Amino acid sequence: MEIRNQSFNAFSEHFLTSSVLNTSYESIRRLQKRMEDLYENTTTYNLLGFLLDILTASERADVIKYFLDKRSNEDYLKYALFRMATLTHNQAKERIEGKTDDDAYKSISNFVKFFEEEEIYDVPNQEWSNRYLFFCNVMAAEERNAKFEFWYHDENGKLIHYWTKKSIEHIWPKSKVSPNGGNGNVSRILLNESEVSEHMLGNLVFLHTLDNTRFKDKTPTVKRQRYFDLRSQDEDGKRFYSRGMLHTMAAFGGEEWEKDIDMVPQIIKKRHTNEIKILRNRYGFTE
């Protein structure tokens, strides 16, 4: 007991003086105000929320510390892009500061090249697909100066995080591709001739896993109707969870998919080319 008393007395002498308490209080108030600023600012809210989703618990402290320091929105965006592409905290910081790192550049290059491939679905790095397509939806909100809704309430009122319900959905369903086409199917021959696959970036979007299950083999027209008809219910009477995913909504918004099924390969190719251009521009690969 005597040792405890001595320890507490020593602590009191050093840390419970009025000057130390005042300094600590001011520091806490400044920290609180900075956190409020991050929350109020749409860009920092979106980018910080995204990173806290996709990174592990052990990485989040560095992310929060980085955002607590006042930087430009451009630097925050670069940091988010670099961390998404698997760079470490220090690699991302150094690259933003203009320092060269061959390993960091290789990681970014590999990340971009991954999406340029014909098939990025059901592969070891599908986590990258989840990250980037989720990011596209966050940025779609950001471009409208809106805060992305990272959370939602399920039908029982429980607060759920979208990232925990992540899945990748095919715009043109993979079940409606057959060797020779016909009966509402796209011909594998036509896909090969166009050098595209139903599993490439141009045909994939981020979707809540329950919505993915309900879509199953439905065509883009039916999916579009589900998305945009707010009065409709799914076959099981359940709500549709993914309406806040603006990038995904835009992908289903076009009516061109079923005007001529033989044109689906070209539609996928066009979307793929456009999505890759956006991705490369984000990482500064403009050539």
Image: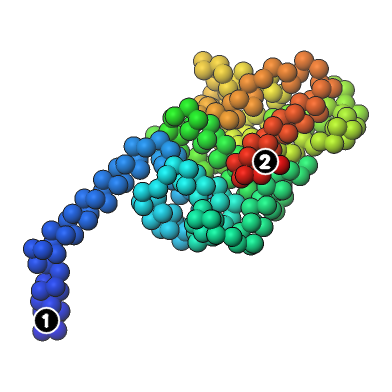
Residue pictured at 64% horizontal, 56% vertical: 105
Q: x%, y% of residue 94?
A: 51, 59
Q: Residues within 10 Å of mark 2 (few under 14, many from 20)?
A: few
Can you say which quadrant of the picture contains the N terminus?
A: bottom left
In percent of width and height, residue 212 lies at 62, 34
Which numbered disc, 2 or 1, marks the residue closer to the eye? Answer: 2
Q: How many marks?
A: 2
Under circle 2, the secondary element is: loop
Q: Nearer the viewer, residue 277 or 181?
A: 277
Residue toward you, 173 or 107: 107
The quarter of the picture where the C terminus appears is: top right
- Which residue appears farthest toward the left when viewing the image? 18
Q: Any mark on residue 6, and which? A: 1
Asked whether, in this view, residue 125 is left or right of residue 44, the answer is right
**194 relative position to 42: left or right:** right
Q: How crowded is mark 1: few (under 14 residues within 10 Å), some or many (20 or more)?
A: few
Q: Which residue lies furthest to the bottom in this view?
A: 2
Camera sees residue 62: yes
Q: Name the residue under label 2.
A: 286
Q: Is residue 210 shown to the viewer in this render? A: no
Q: Which colour scheme is used?
A: rainbow
Q: Which residue is at 48% across, 43% downward? A: 74
Residue 36 pos. (x, y %) = 30, 42
Q: Residue at x 10, y 84 (%)?
A: 2
Q: Which of marks 2 and 1 is nearer the N terminus?
A: 1
- Mark 1 residue type: Gln
Describe residue 29's horizontal placement relative to residue 201 as left or right: left
Task: Give the CA separation, mark 2 to mark 1.
Answer: 66 Å
